[in-house]
Amino acid sequence: MITENIVITDRLENTFNSFFQSVAYSDVGVLVDENTLQHCYPLIYDFLPDHHLIQIQSGEIHKNLNICSHIWQKMTDAGFDRKALLVNVGGGVIGDMGGFCAATYKRGIDFINIPTTLLAQVDAAVGGKLGIDFQGFKNHIGLFKDPLKVIISPVFLNTLSKRELRSGFAEVIKHSLIADRNYWPNIVHHPFEKQDWPSHITHSVNIKSEVVSKDFKEDGLRKVLNFGHTIGHAVESYFLNTPSPLLHGEAIAMGMLSEVYLSQKYCQMPENEASQIERFLLDVYGHVDLEDIQIKEIARLAIQDKKNERGAIQCALLREIGQAVYDVKVGVDDIEEALNHYKNKG
């Protein structure tokens, strides 16, 4: 169920021409980082109207209020009014932060997202979640607002490294595990190098769009999309300020493997299915060595997860492949136990 504001296309020129012929803006800003400036901006430059280029540094570590201030200042210096448009060209960081800055500038201007990573195309750009990190906590400050348009094109995948592509693959895996048992063989029976990315993009966008359409502000059903993310976000936050930060999908893969363990414990997930998922995740993502002190710190970070209520850690877990449940209460000791299970897989 792809919604009207999402376009999946390999004909970028036609899509951009159609969009800018239908609307008129007082100013247009284009937000990029150093990577999308070099590799992706040239692919759409000829299709854009006159615009102001705003550049930031790439990486989750820069998704903070200081960089927001830089973006707001650039829009202010350019004289943007409430009829301006911001075009976000990049991955999840650009989409999350650019959308957040647009939605809060002069109480809100229009923005469109051009997701250029697999991760953004199958997950971050869909669903209207905007936000930034704060004091080491991922997406701690934010809001819900849909972009006017999301333009997704597989052509941008050619600009990605294998590591970036693999990071996005984690969300593809998640979408099948939580909602589509029949699609799972299309993933698990093929090596990473043989995955069908255009098919995966359409499948993931359909699943996420359908879930979000039923629960935009995450009051219930949408929480199933957080499978792997309670522990995964804590892992990502922990490693963010270390010499070896993990990409989002790498942390989510660790989170999914750990939460499969909790799915067996709390939801009676079949052992053979859990084992198949674990083998596949380890084959694709390898193993990150964890020390006991790291496990305790990661578990502590999970207490700050946005889904928690009244001090209780709440996970989205699996009953079986294709069927997820949400608001499963677990303790800090459960998180440590699950991470120790992951540790012992190395």
Image (cartoon, rainbow, N blue to C red):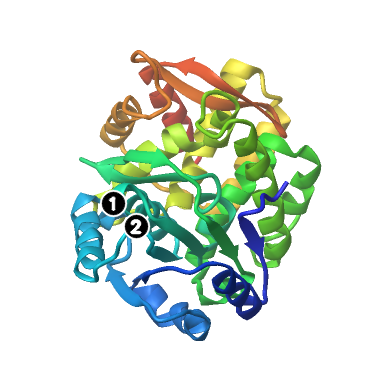
* Residue 178 at x, y percent in the picture: 66, 35
Asked whether residue 167 is in view, the answer is: yes
The quadrant holding residue 53 is bottom left
* Residue 29 at x, y percent in the picture: 36, 70
SS class of the residue under badge 2?
Answer: loop
Asked whether residue 196 is in view, the answer is: no
Foreground pick, 259 / 47? 47
Foreground pick, 46 / 341? 46
Amino acid at dot 2: Arg
Left or right of residue 40: residue 332 = left
Residue sitting at x 59%, y 24%:
263
Q: Which residue is mark 1?
A: 106
Left or right of residue 19: residue 251 = left
Left or right of residue 88: residue 318 = right
Residue sitting at x 71%, y 66%:
194
Q: Which residue is mark 2?
A: 82
The quadrant holding residue 192 is bottom right
